């Protein structure tokens, strides 16, 4: 009997709903089947994002600022919808169904995008004028079809992206040492797969879009997702499935609702009187910070029925541990807020920097580099920064300081500083590009090499390598154990809000500098604007944000040190045994 129990995974079931047999389900092969979905998601999303601005300006004849906003809104929505995907997976659908449904939605979106770029009725007449304002812009119907396809892709991306990595880790038993080692390999392979998908998108797919045809490029993305789905479904009988445990978002709302409903309740003099129902081993010690939330654990007369029995409504009374989990999430918010701006600077690399590249000399011999493929420098910089950090910095730091590398907050700080330097470099290069543009106002391609853009791509790419690693580690390690999914979603919202803030900032700058018929900093023609001033503004904001991050990190560290003694205080279990 004991041997049989060792062959089952108590936390997971098979496709029939029975306890998963470890000899027949899970492991490396089923986990690897989900990686094809991730490759195709990267292929579609990045293949579209990095080259979409050239299509919007060159084919749909949208102004420069409007094109940039379409791209950043698309990317922002993609990452924001990760919260929706995570909520549905945790609460209703489970990760398997979530991946299957939203992968199909993304495949439908890329298929529709391929059709919209192929049919001449869905785009305006071609125009050879160097001034885009003289060309006929796409009408509302044509833009409507384009938006429909883009946001179907965004919906699919958000839904599946929140579940793919989690579903892969579901195939391993953390309590089994052998499978725990396999899981660590899965994480490294997962990052490698993301990089491969992105590299293929910004090189091969972008080249096909520019030289063969947009519809071919997007059609390949749709077909590859179909094949990935077939491979994914082939492993249905071999997967392990975790049961839906409910969304942390609901738990947070319950604590806030309970605290607000009892805002007039009297706080007990002895914290042991606060409601708690979790076993000793699972409890989080009470802290004095954000004490207004402690009202959610105060037991009042309203928690008893008319006959005197104790009845717990989770929207009116929550255990101390759940309240402390919410407190922990609140403590992460200052760091969360000060990392948003990085992704605003990153957004410029796939929008205005690509537009800059379209006006510059991009030929090497007889080969012309696609403007969108310059983003390969971002991927290359990420891989280089991680390799240098792993092979050089960590050994030196361990030898000098006796610590295995930088802390997650130090990694984030390095990333923020490098991105600020990247925006400063971008502003300097744009000053030179604009000076040449004034001398050659009648040409579409300026006599200045595109390699001038390398510093800004490398600095922001290096910054991404550090900040992405630091953010992911910070939000996972600093969040409560039962809110790991929520913390990952919180991390992804920094990307989303960064892209949305880029759209907002572009709109504000355009309105402020382009009123009264003026060209402004971000007008219709990039060669007649002042993109250098916009980059300079972003550089200034980035350095200010860097300072705010340092203050937030110091505050978080000080609060953590102060609260350390409080870990000795354990809230005793109340005499009430009913569960919340």
Image (cartoon, helix red, strand yellow):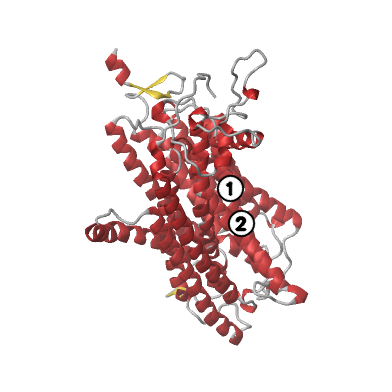
Q: Earlier in the sequence, mark 2 or mark 1?
A: 1
The disc at residue 212 is none
Horizontal and vertical percent position of residue 236: 45, 28
Query: Is any part of residue 63 visible from this angle?
Result: no
Instruction: Tell me the crowding category of disc 2: few under 14, some 14 to 19, or many 20 or more residues within 10 angstroms, Cα based.
Output: many
Cα separation, mark 2 vs mark 1, equals 10 Å
**Residue nearer the viewer, 250 or 278:** 278
The residue sitting at 60% across, 19% down in the picture is 311
The residue sitting at 50% across, 68% down in the picture is 543
Horizontal and vertical percent position of residue 340: 53, 57
Height in image: 113 above or below 311? below
Residue farthest along the front direction in this orientation? 269
Question: Taking 173 as reference, is 499 left or right?
Answer: right
Q: Secondary structure at mark 2?
A: helix
Label pair 2/1, CB-CB below 8 angstroms:
yes
Q: Quadrant of the N terminus?
A: top left
**Residue nearer the viewer, 471 or 361:** 471
Instruction: Tell me the crowding category of disc 1: few under 14, some 14 to 19, or many 20 or more residues within 10 angstroms, Cα based.
Output: many
The disc at residue 500 is 2
Horizontal and vertical percent position of residue 432: 52, 82
Name which quarter of the figure residue 580 lies in: top right
Q: Secondary structure at mark 1?
A: helix
Residue farthest along the bottom direction in this orientation? 439
The disc at residue 80 is 1
Height in image: 342 above or below 25? below
């Amino acid at each position: 009997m004991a041997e049989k129990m060792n062959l089952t995974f108590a936390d997971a079931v098979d496709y029939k709903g029975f306890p998963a047999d470890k000899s027949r389900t899970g492991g490396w092969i089923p986990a690897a089947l989900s990686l094809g979905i991730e490759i195709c998601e990267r292929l579609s999303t990045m293949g579209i994002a990095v080259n979409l601005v050239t299509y919007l300006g060159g084919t749909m004849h949208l102004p420069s600022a409007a094109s940039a906003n379409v791209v950043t809104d698309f990317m922002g929505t993609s990452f924001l919808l990760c919260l929706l995907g995570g909520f549905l997976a945790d609460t209703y659908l489970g990760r398997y169904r979530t991946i299957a449904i939203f992968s199909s939605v993304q495949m439908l979106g890329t298929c529709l995008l391929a059709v919209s770029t192929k049919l001449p009725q869905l785009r305006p007449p071609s125009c050879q004028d160097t001034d885009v304002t003289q060309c006929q812009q796409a009408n509302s119907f044509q833009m409507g079809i384009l938006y429909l396809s883009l946001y179907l892709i965004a919906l699919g991306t958000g839904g599946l992206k929140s579940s793919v990595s989690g579903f892969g880790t579901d195939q391993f038993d953390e309590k089994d040492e052998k499978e725990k080692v396999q899981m660590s390999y899965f994480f490294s392979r997962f990052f490698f797969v993301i990089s491969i998908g992105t590299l293929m998108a910004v090189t091969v797919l972008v080249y096909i879009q520019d030289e063969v045809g947009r519809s071919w490029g997007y059609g390949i993305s749709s077909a590859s997702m179909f094949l990935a789905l077939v491979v994914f479904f082939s492993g249905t009988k071999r997967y392990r499935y975790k049961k839906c445990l409910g969304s942390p978002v609901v738990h947070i709302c319950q604590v806030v609702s309970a605290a607000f409903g009892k805002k007039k309740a009297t706080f007990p003099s002895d914290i042991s009187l606060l409601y708690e129902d979790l076993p000793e081993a699972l409890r989080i010690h009470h802290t004095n910070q954000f004490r207004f939330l402690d009202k959610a654990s105060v037991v009042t007369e309203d928690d008893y029925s008319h006959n005197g029995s104790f009845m717990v409504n989770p929207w009116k009374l929550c255990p101390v541990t759940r309240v402390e989990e919410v407190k922990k999430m609140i403590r992460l918010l200052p760091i969360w807020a000060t990392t948003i701006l990085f992704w605003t600077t990153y957004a410029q690399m796939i929008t205005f920097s690509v537009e800059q590249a379209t006006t510059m000399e991009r030929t090497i011999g007889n080969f012309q580099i696609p403007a969108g493929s310059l983003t390969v420098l971002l991927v290359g910089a990420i891989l280089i920064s991680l390799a240098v950090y792993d092979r050089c910095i960590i050994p030196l730091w361990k030898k000098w300081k006796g610590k295995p590398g930088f802390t997650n907050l130090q990694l984030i700080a390095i990333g923020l500083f490098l991105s600020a330097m990247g925006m400063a470099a971008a502003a300097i290069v744009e000053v030179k590009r604009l000076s040449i543009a004034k001398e050659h106002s009648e040409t579409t391609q300026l006599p200045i090499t595109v390699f001038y853009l390398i510093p800004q791509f490398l600095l922001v790419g290096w910054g991404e390598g550090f900040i992405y690693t630091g953010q992911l580690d910070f939000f996972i390690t600093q969040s409560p154990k039962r809110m790991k999914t929520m913390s990952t979603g919180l991390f992804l919202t920094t990307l989303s809000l960064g892209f949305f803030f880029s759209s907002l900032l572009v709109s504000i700058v355009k309105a402020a500098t382009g009123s009264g018929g003026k060209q402004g900093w971000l007008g219709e023609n990039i060669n007649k604007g002042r993109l250098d001033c916009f980059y300079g503004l972003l550089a200034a904001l980035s350095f200010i944000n860097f300072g705010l991050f340092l203050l937030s990190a110091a505050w978080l560290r000080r609060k953590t040190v102060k609260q350390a003694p409080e870990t000795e205080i354990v809230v005793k279990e109340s005499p009430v045994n009913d569960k919340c």
